[in-house]
Image (cartoon, helix red, strand yellow):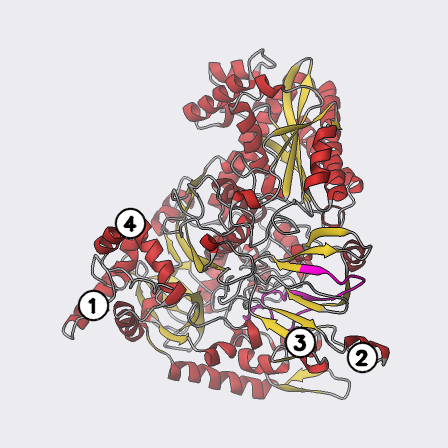
Amino acid sequence: MDKYPPKEVLKDLIEGKLDWRRVKQIMSSPKDADRFEKYLALMQERVRWPEKILLPLGEHLYIVAKGKQRIVKCDCGCEFGDWRENWKLKALVYVRNTRQKLAEIYPGPRSPDPAWCEIREFYCPGCGTQLEVENVPPGYPVTFDFLPDIDGFYAQWLGKPLSEQVSAEDKSVKVTSQWARELSRQPTPKVARNARTSSAARAKRAG
Amino acid sequence: MATQAAMQALREPVSKSLKERMAESEALWKETGHYHGIRELTLKEKDPLRYELFHSRLLSTVIAAREVAKQISSSVMTREEGELSFALYTPEGDSVVFSTGIMVHIGVMGNFIKWMIRNDWQDDPGVAEGDHFANNDVLISAVHVPDVYFATPIFHEGEIVGWSSGVTHVLEVGSITPGGGMTSLAVERQLEGIHLCAEKVALNDRLRRDYELGIRRNTRLASFWLLDDRARITGNVFIREEVKKIIAEFGLEYYMAAIRELIEEGRRIHLARVQERLIPGRYRNPCFHTSMLKGRPGVLPQANADKLLHYPVEITVRPSGEIVLDLEGASSWGFHNFNAPPGAIYGGLSITLAQALDFDGRANGGCMLNVVLKLPHGSIVNPDYDFVSTGFSWGSVMAIFNGFLKCMSHGFFSRGYREEVLTGGNITTAVEFGGKDQYGRQTGGVNIEVTASASGARAVADGIDAAWSLWNPEGDQGNAEMWELLYPHLYLGRRVVTDSGGAGRNRGGCCFESLWMIHNSNFVYTYQIPGIVNIVTNYGIFGGYGGGSGYINIAKKTDLAERIAQRLPIPHSEGDPDQPDIKRLLKGEIITGKDAQYISEPLKEGALYEKFYLPGGGGYGDPLDRDLGQIERDISLRFVSEEMARKLYGAVGKANADGDWTADAARSEKLRATMRKARLARAVPVKDWWSKERARIASGGIKGETAEMYTECLSRSPGWTKDYREFWALPKNFSFPAAPQD
C-alpha cells in the first residue's frame, strides 16, 4: 500500500502547516495502510509523559496504558480515569445558560434561548483547554461521545492483539451511582408535587 | 465459487417476472452474504482493464445524462444549482452507478423501483419500452414532495435489463401555500401538494396530455415543473440508449454479470473502507430541531404547538465492518412537517456514507447492504400515521446526519485520518413565495440558494464559506440575476455573514445572507421554510462551537424609496447584528423575527426581506489554539469581527491606515493565558454541577417545551429512558411534571 504521506508530511498536516493543495492531494490519494502506526509515533513524540498511547481520543486527549489500566489522559498530564467511564465526568464544566453568557459566543439574535438550549464547555482541570462543547437542552445527560472497542480494533483490524483483553463496556453509570451514594447521606431530591410517575402518566393517558 | 443458484441467475435474460428475479436475488443475499450470491469477482480478476472500462462507460453515461438534462430544464434549481441526479439500476432496482448532484435520492429511487416490482406494476399498469413512471410519494419511497422521480425500464430483446431513473427538485408543487411543499402549514399529507404515486406519466417517451393538464391546473409554476419532467425523461432516455450501445459492445451476458459484480464489489470496498478508516465502537451525538407553529397564522388546531424534536444518534461500528444507526429515544411523529420516514433516513445515510467513506470506491447499492437502521416505530423517523406530513423531512435528515458526521469524525480522528474529519455544517432553510409576480401573473415558488452555504471545519482546514451542502456536493446558489427573473424580488445584497462560523482552532464555514427588495409587485407572501431557532443545532468538535440559531429581518413601510432617490446609503447586508443596517439606516416598520417559520402578511413594493442561512458550520478544537495569522485574514475579509476575535479567540491587535488588521502576538498570548485561567476559575467539577442539575430535574425545574420533549421520549423508549434515569440516578419510575394546560 502507498506510504504517502511520510511521517514528516503527516506531522505538518496535523499541525496545519500544509497548504490546501497538498491537503487535497492527501485527501484524494489512496490511504496509507501504515497511517495509524505513524500517527501513534507522532502523538507519542508530542507528549512529555511516559505512558504508551493506545488511541488518540481528541485534540488533547489520549487513551493510554498505565500499568495494567487504560486511562484517558490530557497532553498536559491530567488524568481522567478509566477509558470506559465518560472522561467528561472528571472534567470541569462551565454552562452557558443565561442570555448574557450565550451572547458572549453568539452575538445578537443568533443566540439560542436558554430555556431550550444550553452550551456546556468542558475544560481540562490541568491546563484549562476547552476539550469539548455540548449544545443540548437543559437536563440532558452528558454525552459519552465515543467508546472505542480497543481490543476489537487491535486484534481484529490491526492483527496486533493487546496483551490483556478488556470488554468495551460503558462504566459511566458507576461514576454517577457513586455520586448518588455520596449524596444519599444528604437529603434525597424532592420530586415535584406535580411530577408524575410513569405508571401514573400511563393511567392518565388511558383515561 | 458462486453457488449453482447464483450461476443460474447470472445467465440472463430469463423469462421470469421482475418480482421473481428480485426474490431470487434477495434469497441469494440472505443465503450467501454476498450480493446476488457473487462470491468471487470473476470478471474483475479475469480482465481488470475490460472491467474498469465497462465501469467507466457506465459512470460517464450517468454523469453525461445529468449534464444533458440540465440543459432541458429552465428552473434555477435544476439548471444552475444542479439539484438533479441520475442513476442506472439493475432490473431489481439496485443502483449500479450514479451521477453527482442530489445523490441522496439514489437509494430511495431504487426502493421506488422495488416498490413497483413488489406491487406487480409489471402486470398492471404494465411496464413497456418508453414508459416513464413518476413518484414523489414518501409512503412508496421518496424524501419529500418537491423531489420528483422518473424511472424508465431498459429493454433488450424483450427483456428488462435495467432501469434508468432521475430526480429533480421542482419549484412549486401546489401545496396549501405557494412553494415547494415544505411550508409549515402542510401539517398533514393532504396539504403538501401533488402526490405522484408510481404513476405512468409518459408513453413512448412523451408525457401524457392528461398528466400535463393535471400539473398545469394544480401547481402554480407549471411550466417549470413540465420542463423538469422533460429534463428527467431526457436523462433517462440518454442512459437507456447508451446502455444499449454498451450492451452491443460488451455483450448481454457480460453486461448482466458485470453490473452485479460492481455492486458486490461496492459492498466489499465499503466494508474495507470502514475497517481502514474508522475504529470499532459506539459513537453518540444527540441532535435536535425545533418546530415553531404555536399561534402562527393559518395553523390547524392539531398543530398549534411549539416543539423541541429529539434525535439521539447512536452508531455502532462492529468489528465485522457493519454500521448500525440506532435512533432509539427519538421524538414521536407529530402534526408538523419534520416527520422523516425510513426512506428519507436511508437516503440521508447513503449520501453521507457516499461522501465520507465510499467516495473513492464503487459508490452504489452495495455500500448500503451492510448498514442496519434501527428506527423506532411510531417515532418521527418511522411514523405510523397514514396521513403524516413529511414536507420538510429534510430538516430532520440534516440534523441527524450532521450528528452522524461528527460521530464518524471521532473514528477518523482516532485512526489518524485527520483529513477526513468534518464537523456539522449547513442545515436547510429557505423561503417560499406566492402572490403576484413582477409580470402581473399569479405565481408561487421557492428559492433554495441555501444549496451552497457553510460547511463544518475540518481537522486540517477551516470550513468552507458559503459554498457547501451535505445533500449536494456540487452545491451552487444560482445566479442572483436568474432568481430575480423568476420571482418579484431584487437582490440588494448577498454576502457572507460575519461571525457566523462556529469558533474553533479551525473555524466553521461562514453562512451567507440575502437581502431582497420586493419589486414590481404589491402582493407577495413569504413563507419561511422551517429553519432552526432557539437552539444551536449543528456541532463543533474537540472544543469548537456549533453555529448560531436563525432569524430574519423584515422591513415594511420604510423610507427606502426616498433614500434611493436621494442617493443615501441603504442596507445591503446585516452589518452589526446588535444594530443591523436595516434598522440603523431605515425608518419604518422593521421586524427582527426569531421565527424561522415566519409567514408574512402580503408584502408590497419596496418591502425588504433579509434571509440568513444560519447556522454556520461547527468549529474544530479550542478557539484559543487558533493561529493568529488566520484570524488576521478572517478580520480582513470581515468573516470575523474584531470584537468576537477578542472574545472568542483571545486575539487583539489593530488596523493600519489602510484598514489591514494585524494581531499583536504578545498581547494576544497574554490575553489567552488570562482566558484559560478565567475558565478554571469559573468552571466547576462536573460532579458538583451534576448534583445541582439532578436536584433541579427532580424538583420540576425543567419546564415548557423542553420538559414536554423529555416526557414524550421517556414514555416511548425504554432503552433511552433507562439511560436517562441511570445517568441522573433518578428513581426508576421518574417522569417529568405534566405540561401546563392552556
Are dots 2 and 4 on a single chain?
Answer: yes
The amino acid type of the residue labelled 2 equals: Arg
Determine whether B78 is above or below B481 in the image. above
The amino acid type of the residue labelled 1 equals: Ala
Q: Write the residue at 67% across / 31% down.
A: B55
Q: Write the residue at 25% across / 66% down.
A: A194
Q: Nearer the viewer, residue A9 or B347?
A: B347
Q: Secondary structure at mark 1?
A: helix
Q: Earlier in the sequence, mark 3 or mark 4?
A: 3
Determine whether B546 is above or below B561 in the image. above
In the picture of the structure, the residue carrying the numbered disc 2 is B563
Q: Secondary structure at mark 4?
A: helix
Q: What subunit carries mark 1?
A: A
- Residue B522: say if magenta: yes
Q: What subunit carries mark 4?
A: B
The amino acid type of the residue labelled 3 equals: Glu
Q: Which mark is residue B589?
A: 3
Q: Residues within 10 Å of mark 2 (few under 14, many from 20)?
A: some
Q: Secondary structure at mark 3?
A: strand
> Cα distance, mark 2 to mark 4?
62 Å
